[in-house]
Image (spheres, helix red, strand yellow):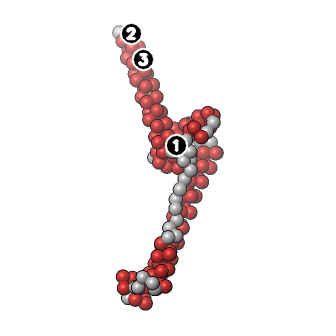
């Protein structure tokens, strides 16, 4: 596997790790705010909508981290880059990555990764069929 593809994988893993860490931090902070609110009003449900405790909970909820990835189309790339991406899709697919994760790692639309995988599977099936027919023909010729 190319070093550049390994770098793309590590970058994807870092994005996921950072997002998970940010999410955990948000929920830890929300828990503290909820506990303060419950300490004062005995229940979050009993807190008035205009109370500072409730307002801080509502405000904190708007800080939910967003996970997003690039999603280019093949038309946005040069022919050379598109060919490279197709090879990388196949390489990641053969390593067992699911389609959506392949798309995230490579920064392409999921349907492009899926279509590339389907085309690759058809190509492999065709090659296997041709080889099978050739073996059958060779065995028939030996009789």
Please say if the residues under marks 2 and 3 sit with CB atoms less than 8 Å apart: no
Residue identifier under label 3: 134
Q: Earlier in the sequence, mark 1 or mark 2?
A: 1
The residue indicated by pointer 2 is 141
Disc 2 and disc 3: Cα gap in Å? 11 Å
Mark toward the start of the polypeptide (2 vs 3): 3
Q: Residues within 10 Å of mark 3 (few under 14, many from 20)?
A: few
Judging from the image, what secondary structure is the residue with disc 1 in? helix
- Residue 13 in percent (x, y) is at 55, 56
In this figure, which residue is indicated by the disc labeled 1? 92
- Say which quarter of the image contains residue 50: bottom left
Q: Tell me which residue sits at (40%, 89%) in the image.
A: 41
Residue at image position (55%, 41%) is 73
Residue 122 is tagged as none
Residue 107: image location, x then y, percent? 56, 47
Q: Which is nearer the eye, 131 or 43?
A: 43
- What is the x, y in percent for residue 141? 39, 9
């Amino acid at each position: 596997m190319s070093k550049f593809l390994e770098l793309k994988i590590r970058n994807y893993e870092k994005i996921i790790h950072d997002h998970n860490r940010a999410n955990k931090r948000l929920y830890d902070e929300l828990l503290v705010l909820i506990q303060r609110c419950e300490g004062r009003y005995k229940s979050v449900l009993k807190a008035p909508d205009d109370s500072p405790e409730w307002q801080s909970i509502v405000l904190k909820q708007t800080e939910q981290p967003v996970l997003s990835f690039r999603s280019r189309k093949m038309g946005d790339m040069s022919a050379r880059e598109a060919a490279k991406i197709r090879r990388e899709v196949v390489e990641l697919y053969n390593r067992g990555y699911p389609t959506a994760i392949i798309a995230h790692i490579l920064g392409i639309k999921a349907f492009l990764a899926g279509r590339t995988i389907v085309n690759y599977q058809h190509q492999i099936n065709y090659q296997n069929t041709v080889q099978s027919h050739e073996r059958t023909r060779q065995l028939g010729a030996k009789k």
